[in-house]
Amino acid sequence: MKLTFLGGVRTVTGSCYLLQGKDFRILVECGMYQGHDSEAVNRRPFSFDPAEIDCLFLTHSHLDHIGLVPRLVKEGFRGRIFATSATADIVELILRDSAHIQESDTEWYNRKALRTGHALKEPLYQSRDVDMVMPLIQRKHYNRIEQLRQGVRYRFVNAGHILGSSTLELWYDEDGREKKISFSGDIGKKENPIVSDPVFVEETDYLTIESTYGNRNHKDMEASIEELVDVIKTTFRKGGNVIIPSFALGRTQDLLFILNKLVKQDRLFRINVYIDSPLGERITKVYAAHPEYFDEEGREFFTLESRDALRLHFTKKPEESMALNRIKKEAIIISSSGMCEGGRVRHHLKHNLWRRESSIVFVGYQAEGTLGRQIVDGAKVVEVLGEDVVVRAGIHTLGGFSAHADQRELLEWIGQFRNRPEIFIVHGEEQSSLAFQDAIQKRFSYPTHVPTLGEVFDI
């Protein structure tokens, strides 16, 4: 078996891994790259023929793991796609939203190109390509070992990252001996709001493991919640707004859960929270439809309609979103995208970044090359929607809200193995992956690799 790393190596986004046996090809993830020069990267030709891929496994439904699936199908893939039921529901919402963005951005670009005489371009993919994806998806349950083909079995177990997220275990016959490779997916930290804690894999021959936070540990969750309370109270006293760039999937639902709990505990007064993301509202409804994935508190929040502590507002139409920019104080606006690379949050940044009385709160990872990373790194002026905007607002990064395990938790996850696996470190910026490699070698002395793009290993 050959394992080829086609994305998500020495970078956080664009996960994609190819397994090649003697007469079959398996793809694990087919993610969109987000960051510097993303347009060009996502349009690069695949290094394989999509028509020759037999099946695709998706560990969860974030865009950096699924975002190029419609392009894969557009270019000839017709195999089966395996995912958990909740992942499948969310995949459809995420991909349709992504296709709409591709179509809208291309239409805008082509109108401008016609005026300037530049060449027109086609969208990366369209809604009709998403239509072709959905019939290929097969919904699977956690903890069931299933036969993929002769000599190949697989199982999904709970990764504890977002709703339906998985670690993939795959057994295969190699020269008369059964071997096993595991793909961690994105591993959640313990005590994430709503979803259950990640499940440990006890034995594997090979492991690909994420390293988003492979070089550092999170602040304690309660400390981050206390900081959020302080930011909200201080900002409102100054007469400003709190803007929270947040992924529509996962982080938005976690924030609603936490804010609702804070109001019920009388740690915050009854506050106005605006979810400026139609996708976020649709995904929240998917969460409510899958209580089987929740911990006890999560089930109560979504099934007993206990969200009445918040003054919660969902904006649907563009004009409702624009109306939020006329609110000058005492609003919490949660809007995508989480890295500020697109979506409605850019408009709220444009109207609040320059205001000393407002605060911008980052609750998720900001990849290199993104607008969010520029702001977090202390840029004094940033370009937002084609205009230079001075950064005067308070900038806060609350690491405890991350849905990813930190270095300590990743090492604990690895420490459950009863054997000595060979480990491939992925899904992390280069310095994070290399630091995590050092930590693994010091703690366990396991053979480890930090692959480069296109690198191939025999397993």
Image (spheres, grey):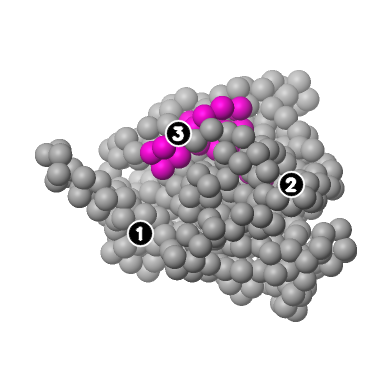
Tell me which amino acid carries mark 1: His
Q: Secondary structure at mark 3?
A: strand
The residue where tag 1 is placed is 100
Q: Are the residues flagged by discs 3 and 1 in contact, CB closer than 8 Å?
A: no
Measure how far apart labels 3 and 1 are at the Cα level.
Answer: 27 Å
Query: Within the image, what quadrant is residue 195 found in?
Result: bottom right
Q: Secondary structure at mark 1?
A: helix
Q: How many marks?
A: 3
- Viewer-side residue, 377 vs 128: 377
Tell me which amino acid carries mark 3: Asp
Could you say where residue 441 lies in the image, as x and y percent from the top left? 71, 22
The residue where tag 3 is placed is 388
In primary-sequence order, the first of circles 3 and 2 is: 2
Q: Residues within 10 Å of mark 1 (few under 14, many from 20)?
A: some
Query: Within the image, what quadrant is residue 136 found in?
Result: bottom left
Specify the label residue 238 is tagged with: 2
Looking at the rendering, the stretch of residues picked out in magenta corresponds to 363-387
Could you say where residue 301 lies in the image, as x and y percent from the top left? 75, 71
Tell me which amino acid carries mark 2: Lys
Which label lies toward us, 3 or 1? 3
